[in-house]
Image (spheres, helix red, strand yellow):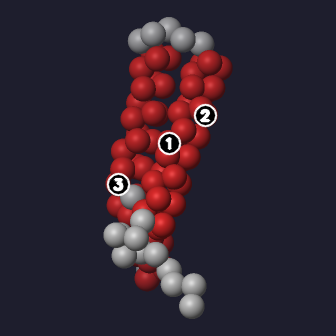
Amino acid sequence: MTILRDVLAELIGMFVGDARLSAAILAVVAGTALLIEIGRVEPLIGGGVLLVGCLIVLLAAVRRAALRATDPGSGNQRDSA
């Protein structure tokens, strides 16, 4: 039972750890679902929108993390010495 609790805690921590990333991915998924259901877009095109949208969100999150890591005012920069 402890292992299951630890796994669930890790899963929740992944989503809570970067709330902006989680919210953006949920927005992409919801937007794609609306396009397919309401906009009558073909599911294959919806899959492409989902792929491109998730890649854009991922690249933006990586860029934001890289900028935060190199920003001298953030306190996250590692010393080379």
Under circle 3, the secondary element is: helix
Could you tell me which residue is drawn at 61 percent across and 34 percent down? 51
Q: Which residue is mark 1?
A: 57
> Could you say which is closer to the camera, residue 2 or residue 74?
74
> Could you say which is closer to the camera, residue 72 or residue 52?
72
Which numbered marker is on residue 51?
A: 2
Cα separation, mark 3 vs mark 1, equals: 12 Å
Cα separation, mark 1 vs mark 2, equals: 10 Å
Q: Amino acid at mark 1?
A: Val
Camera-nearest label, 3 or 1:
1
Could you tell me which residue is drawn at 39 percent across and 58 percent down? 18
Which numbered marker is on residue 19?
A: 3
Cα separation, mark 3 vs mark 2, equals: 20 Å
Q: Amino acid at mark 2?
A: Leu
Under circle 1, the secondary element is: helix
Residue 62: x and y, percent?
A: 53, 54
Position above or below: 50 against 9: above
Across the whole image, how many numbered discs are drawn on residues?
A: 3
Residue 53: x and y, percent?
A: 53, 33
Residue 13: x and y, percent?
A: 39, 67
Q: Is residue 80 left or right of residue 9?
A: right
Under circle 2, the secondary element is: helix
Q: Earlier in the sequence, mark 1 or mark 2?
A: 2
> Could you say which is closer to the camera, residue 75 or residue 51?
75
Q: Earlier in the sequence, mark 3 or mark 2?
A: 3
